[in-house]
Image: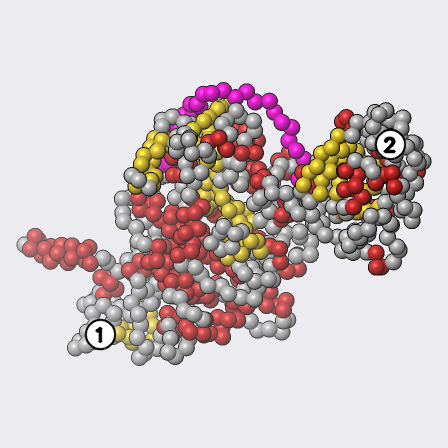
Amino acid sequence: MEGCIAFLLNTTSSLLSPSLLCSPPFLLHVLHHACQNVVRCGEGHNFTLIKENVSLRETATPNSSTPWLSSQPITAHHVTQGRGYKLQTSSVWSSLSKSEHVPQVAPSFITLVPLLMEVPSFYTRGKRAKWLPPPCEDSDLEIDDDTIDDDCFDPDFLLAEDNDDDDIRPLASGSGARVRPQPLPEEDDESVEEEPAAHRKARTRVRPQRHRVWKKEDICISSLPEFSPLAPDCILSPWEYFLLMLPIDLLEDVVYQTNLYAKQKDVNTSFSIDIHELMQFIGIVIYKGVVHLPSIEDYWATKTRIPQVADMMASKRFRLIRSLLHFNNNENVQASTDRFFKVRPLFSGVTKQFQKVAETPTQSVDEVMVAYKGTRAGSLRQYIQNKPDKWGYKLFCRASIDGFIHDILLYQGETTFKNHPTELSQEEYDFQVTMKTVIALVKTLKKPKETAIYADNWFTSISLVEYLKEKYGCRYVGTARPNRIGDPPLRAVKDMEKKSVPRGALDYHSTDGILALRWKDNKIVTVISSDAGVEPLKTVLRYDREQKKVEVTCPSVIKEYNGKMGGIDKSDMLTHLYKSPMRARRWYMKLFGYVLDLCICNAWLLYKRDCKALKEKPVPLKNFRLEISWYARGHKVLTTRMTRLSQEAMDMKVPKRGQKTQLPHENVRFNNREWHLPQFVTNRQTCKHCSTKDDVHRTRWMCTVCQVALCLSDSRNCFRFFHVLPEKRLCTSASSSASPSSSV
């Protein structure tokens, strides 16, 4: 009979016995505030009364001298309900107390329901929560389906809260007796402070507590191997790095889905887009991220016209492509539970490319907010107060120490892990959302045994560190909340917060190669680590009112965490420098703009790695972005390395005479991997290499890649010298001039 909550099945119109009102105070609170109260009986007949997060404990031990219930029979019952839970105040406690002074009542009025939910868990249940009770171990605590009344689960059946009479009467039947359920205030628990609401209510399994032996000793772990990627043969162009992140086959799929979506909206439409026009559209969007104007019309307006945009595509055409751009087939949306169905192929495609890049031994896991303030995304739009972009889509990412993002997890509530490409085992699926997030991102690591994960206190728990170490051999370092570190005998937080404790004080214990440390800085910092230890102690500079700068003792694990945790923050900073504007009515277009920015940033970081390996100076991100935009807007020949031109590119129209042809970029002009072939044209054009104002030479030969006219004859070979670097051109001319003298 221990650990039960008493529930009543029906109500009557009788008054409660006056002697019951003279019972202990906790019974009076139950009668007056039954709507928000829960009475719990436990071992020793201790009753716990909880009313709006305020606990009042009173012990009522039955004895012969002080009976705690009236000896007169009680026939009146009172039914209340709070957030879907039935509660009764009657003589059901008589059968629980085993007291001779308590009369017996008819069994039909008594229903005992096992206490399957702890008191803190009751108050942390969200509205419309789906709670699955754990299996009951006591065979005596079983519920018969026939004993549960259907009214017990009526969400509209509530006791009116404005009844202040001493004599509490049952409510009259009718619509006036029904009021809307009021949600209970949630408990201020640090473990659920920042947890998503969709997963705060989905905890269905608690891992068994394992016995840990803590010792006052540091951990000694070998250092991870240094990151040394293979040096490339040469530095690629920005456009080629971009295509490594956003491949051509993925863009061709976007073209197909866009044309299909246009047909689905209007069968008789004549809209059609090809790969070249899609690249022009992407190039314009990327260019707008650098040259930003208040509105889209300003790029085509007379006073604010931007030729790089207006000359490439008409405003009406740009708007039409933006309104029809699509990434997945709408005919399959009904059979999917994925709330990110619209952009799932896009994220899966780029994530697959990201995972091909070499990973640093240190990886950081954190959340990313993609800004979105619209209302069309529903609950996919999250709110986080301490983020620069407070409203938007929440993404969990794993990144290298330099900011290169390798894996992305789209958060969508309880269906997050069901639709993620990385599958979890049944054991892992029953974990809390914080553990599942890290595990899903760790499972895509290439070398988990040679990798250390760094994360903040939202993810960290002692159970996660133990599981990653035992299951995958992966190391972990992260700040932690005091209620998630197990039971190490560390110094209490309140004791370390005292002014008598100097800054830099620390306490640590370890168990099975896992370190739990608490260090005093401006605030108390708690860390769990299986990668770095306390030694060697280091010093950091901190501000002091008197001395301005003072040295504070700092453990090694704190320095390691501060230096290796910022991978996601660095990527977030880079994507915010030049954001691609994608304002549209459709909610997922913001995610497409983020994918473009992320591909550019990852391409630039990979380009910097290659420049570092070859000891070359990289260009800034802004210039790198403009180069990609220039290629996308003007370079129509989308060929892979060392391949011939397509027939479509060979048949391109040549600009008419009188139009000024722009010189190609140096990366195109001197790119020896492209086949610069001469093409015969019908109209003579001015040679771009040897013609001047005084001496104009016209030719019928044109380069198929550079799209400029060049002389190609017995007396003049401008086609060759145009594609040779200036320094190599001087060497060639010198050798040719020296050859006749040597022959003589």
Tell me the chief SS of the magenta region. loop
Residue 484 position within the rendered picture, expressed as x and y whole percent measured from the top left: 56, 33
Q: Amino acid at mark 1?
A: His
- Kindly indicate the quadrant of the structure image that contains residue 726: bottom left
When the figure is inspected, residue 344 is found, relative to residue 91, above or below; the finding is: below
Asked if residue 501 is positioned above or below residue 663 in the image, the reply reads above
Specify the quadrant that holds the N terminus. Answer: top right
Q: Give the number of the disc on residue 697.
A: 1
Q: In this picture, which residue range is highlighted in magenta? A: 202-228
Closer to the chain start, of discs 2 and 1, is 2
For residue 265, say whether it is visible. yes
Rendering coords of residue 628 (x, y %)? 38, 59
Dot 1, how many residues are within 10 Å of its Cα: few (below 14), some (14-19), or many (20+)?
some
- Residue at left offset 57%, top offset 73%: 270
Please give the name of the residue rendered at 46% of the width and 29% of the height, measured from the top-left corner.
Answer: 517
Residue at x 63%, y 67% (from the top left corner): 264
Camera-side mark, 2 or 1: 2
> Which sits in the foreground, 717 or 46?
46
- The kind of secondary structure element at disc 1 is loop
